[in-house]
Image (cartoon, coloured by chain):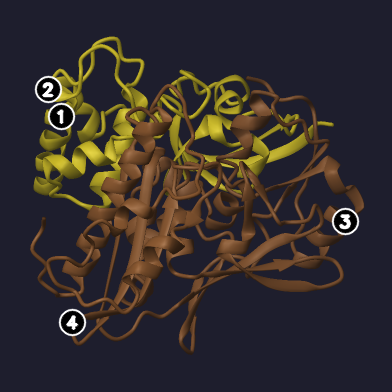
Amino acid sequence: MKRTINLTINEEAFEAEAEPRLLLSYFLRERAGLTGTHIGCVIGECGACTVLLDGRLVKSCLLFAVQADGRKVLTIEGLAKNGALHPIQEAFVQQYGLQCGYCTPGMVLASYSLLRDNLNPTEEEIRKALGGNLCMCTGYVQIVESVKAAAKKLQQS
Amino acid sequence: MIPAPFDYVRPTTLDEAIRLLAANGDEAKLLAGGHSLLPLVKLRLANPKILIDLSRISGLSGIRQEGDQIIIGALTTHYEIESSELLKQACPLLPETARMIGDVQVRNRGTIGGSLAHADPAADLPAAILALGAELRLTGSDDERWIKGEDFFLDLMTTVLKPTEIITEIRVPVLSGRFGTAYLKMPQKASGFAIVGVAVWIKVEDKACTAIGVGVTGLGAKPFRAKEVEKKLWGKRIDHTFIDADASHVDHGIDPLDDIHASAPFRAHLARVYTHRAIQEAVKRAGVSMPSR
């Protein structure tokens, strides 16, 4: 039986119907049309579907949309403001922190979650914070460099 | 990766949840963080007819002190345990263990009650629960009972929980006096699950061990308390012979798991090595110097 699900996605109210078994990742992509949340493994290993739920980093394939009813979701689409990339996104571009881009929304949001709490992370802290996100093309060196560069940008702003 | 259809209910009180559980019995599954249950229903290894989402019941999460005990609500997340200042002071073994579970995203959603009820043989928290002699509060429709961690786990993914019971709280002691704790594990590289994990709590007085708890995960079908090891170290003087061969008793009477990540003999070997190291680390953290062998 379908249910009405109310979310606040990127600070805007959104309502749609869905079966309880619909995963949040599919709800965001297919109902809300926010395809920046990527579907990778769908078993909670790869982190491509990472979003923030009430401010905490989660994998949206490990949640049914109905579980998020009434909560706030931040997806990758919510980071850029007025057409300007978020400093973390800029840093990923400038430091070549992506190749195919599939893991990037999750990587950027995991970085966002880290840097919100810690503006001066060590390399080990960065690697731990990204531990739930897999990249299958670049390896992690440029991604870690991107997070370091993003931290510098955010310290200055 | 799409579960079979199910009905979904979201009670707001514990009584309502217990009523729903009693009414639906084996057809119902409790949903807490869902990080064990969702993979199971997506793979259709579990096909519940109804999911009872506990997340909106107030009072089932949080960490508080009551006298010489810390009470942890069953819906408390691994992140909340990892970052609890109260636990870091009063029972540091739990935050240390929680910090080593999965990844950030998993720790933000996974709950202590869910992990214990699921009883995965490679889960981290059971090792700490056993080492600490923690107790679980199981609430059913007619009564409730407190059960010791060591009596809770029965077998692979099997516990004493009745189909109509909910784990509502976990009680651990406030550690006092001169003590040390440690949780060490050999993680499976991709998942982070423990191939073997050993949690130790040790109390020290006058350079002797006056109490010790050793919890082991990953080795057998269920997590267990290494009582043989504890017995041999209880009351023993802490000098360079303290652990000696005693850690090698850890796998006595245990039939080790055997899979693609580690053979049974290798797992048993790892358990002995990690037991030795975890005890050594706990002793060190208790502020006692003990030359390594």
Q: Amino acid at mark 4?
A: Lys
Q: Amino acid at mark 3?
A: Ala
Residue A25 can be seen, yes or no: yes
For the residues bearing labels 1 and 3, Cβ distance under 8 angstroms: no
Q: Amino acid at mark 2?
A: Gln
Both on one chain, marks 1 and 4? no
Q: Chain of mark 3?
A: B
Residue labelled with disc 1: A146
Q: Is A96 displayed left or right of B182 in the figure?
A: left
For the residues bearing labels 2 and 3, Cβ distance under 8 angstroms: no
Quadrant of the frame with the N terminus of chain A: top right
Both on one chain, marks 1 and 3? no
Q: Chain coloured brown: which letter?
A: B
How far apart are labels 1 and 3 at the CA level? 52 Å
Label 3 or label 4, whichever lies nearer to me, is 4
How far apart are labels 2 and 4 at the CA level? 54 Å
Residue labelled with disc 3: B22
Report crowding for label 4: few under 14, some 14 to 19, many 20 or more residues within 10 A (C-alpha): some
Q: Which x, y percent locates residue A39?
A: 49, 19
